[in-house]
Structure formats: structure tokens, C-alpha cells
Image (cartoon, helix red, strand yellow):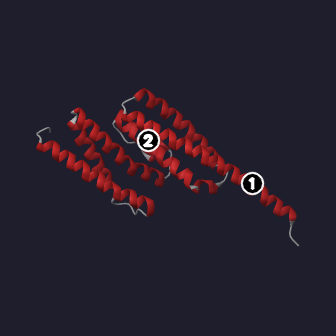
Amino acid sequence: MLNKKDLEQLKKELFNYNAKREELIKKSRDIVASSKQLIYAVHRDDLKTAEQKVKQIEKEKAEIEKIAQADADLHSEGSFFMALQEYAEAVMYYQFVTKNKIPTSGELGICVDSYLGGLADLTGEVFRRAVYLAGKGDYLAVVKIRDLVEEIYGELMYFELKDELRRKFDAIKYDLRKLEDLVLELKLKNKI
């Protein structure tokens, strides 16, 4: 009754998919770890290490994209999406600090959701940088960071964000409020 050859083929396909999925999950964890290391290096102003981490993370990204090409369903794996989002956040932060720019989704080579998630998460990292710079007396850089977060918030207001992206967008509002408070405090102390 059952076509055993067909079932055997399905079993092989499922086995291959699961093997690729496991490989993707492992490599995605590597990207998340490298992203955190990159951000940490930038926070410490260790730009030499940060540059090395950017090269490493670019290679890791190419590896998971190659794995994901094996099956279209792998592109919808949560670990793949999260890895690209962390990658985006880390590279955006690095380029903001080193080049005074935020790369586009095309420059990063990632999908809309990963890009927007990374952009939303970036605001938390630049807020931490603003606090660090305020402590070092670089008050104008704090204002520049506030302006960036305000711009991100203003632009993302026009997107129809759902679920996780919506929660991330709401978090930007709190980062912006904290930055506005920091700038106000600096103004009241005649620092800017």
C-alpha cells in the first residue's frame, strides 16, 4: 500500500534538512557571540580588535547564508534571523563609531526585518556610548547620538511593525527619553 521508496526519499530529505538546520543553528550562535564581542570591543575603544571581529563576522555571515541556500525553509529559522539581526546591530554600531554612518540594508546584504531589528537594537548601544562619552566630557557627541536616536525613532514611526519589531520600536522611545534627559542635564550644567 505505501510507497516505501517515496517514504525512504522523504526520510533522507528530512534527515538532510535537520542536519543543515543544526549546522545553521550552531553557526548562528557563533555570529551572535562574535557580534557581542565586536560591540564590546567598540565600547572599550579597542578598534583594532573590533576591525578583526568585523572581518570574522563577515565570514561567519557568508557561511550561514551558504547553509541557508540549501533549503528555502532555513531562511525562516529563528536562529538565522536572530544572527543576522545581531550582525546588523554590531556592524552598524562599529560603522557609526568608526565612519560616522549607518550602513544600508543593501550594504549589509540582509532582509528588511533583520535590518530593522538591528537598527532598533542599535539605539541601546549608542545610548551606552553617550553615557560613556558624557563621562569623558565629549558633550557634543552625546547630542549627536541623541539626534541619531531621534531620527531612527522618527523614521520607524512610518513602518507597520508587528510583534518583536514593535516591541523593539517601543524600546527606542525609552532610549530616546533617557538621552533627552542626559542632554537636558548637560545643558543645565552648562556643558553644552
The answer to whether the residue labelled 1 contacts the one labelled 2, judged by CB atoms less than 8 Å apart, is no
User: In percent of the image, x 25 and y 46: which residue is there?
Assistant: 147
Question: Outermost residue, top direction?
Answer: 48
In which quadrant will I find the C terminus?
top left
Residue 134 visible within the image: yes
Horizontal and vertical percent position of residue 9: 81, 58
The type of residue carrying mark 1 is Phe
Residue 156 visible within the image: no
**For residue 163, above or below residue 180:** below
* Residue 26 image-quadrant placement: top right
User: In percent of the image, x 60 and y 43: which residue is there?
Assistant: 27
Category of crowding for the residue at label 2, using alpha-carbon neighbours closer than 10 angstroms: few (below 14), some (14–19), many (at least 20): many
Mark on residue 15?
Answer: 1
Q: Of callouts 1 and 2, which one flags the residue occurring earlier in the amino acid sequence?
A: 1
Horizontal and vertical percent position of residue 131: 27, 41
Horizontal and vertical percent position of residue 170: 34, 59
In which quadrant will I find the N terminus?
bottom right
Category of crowding for the residue at label 1, using alpha-carbon neighbours closer than 10 angstroms: few (below 14), some (14–19), many (at least 20): few
User: In percent of the image, x 35 and y 35: which residue is there?
Assistant: 97
Question: Outermost residue, front direction?
Answer: 135
Residue in front for this viewpoint, 106 or 126: 126
Marks 1 and 2 sit apart, C-alpha to C-alpha, by: 34 Å
| Relative horizontal placement of residue 44, taking residue 60 as reference (left or right) | left
Q: Secondary structure at mark 2?
A: helix
The type of residue carrying mark 2 is Ala
Question: Outermost residue, bottom direction?
Answer: 1
Mark on residue 166?
Answer: none
| Relative horizontal placement of residue 99, taking residue 24 as reference (left or right) | left
The residue tagged 2 is 90
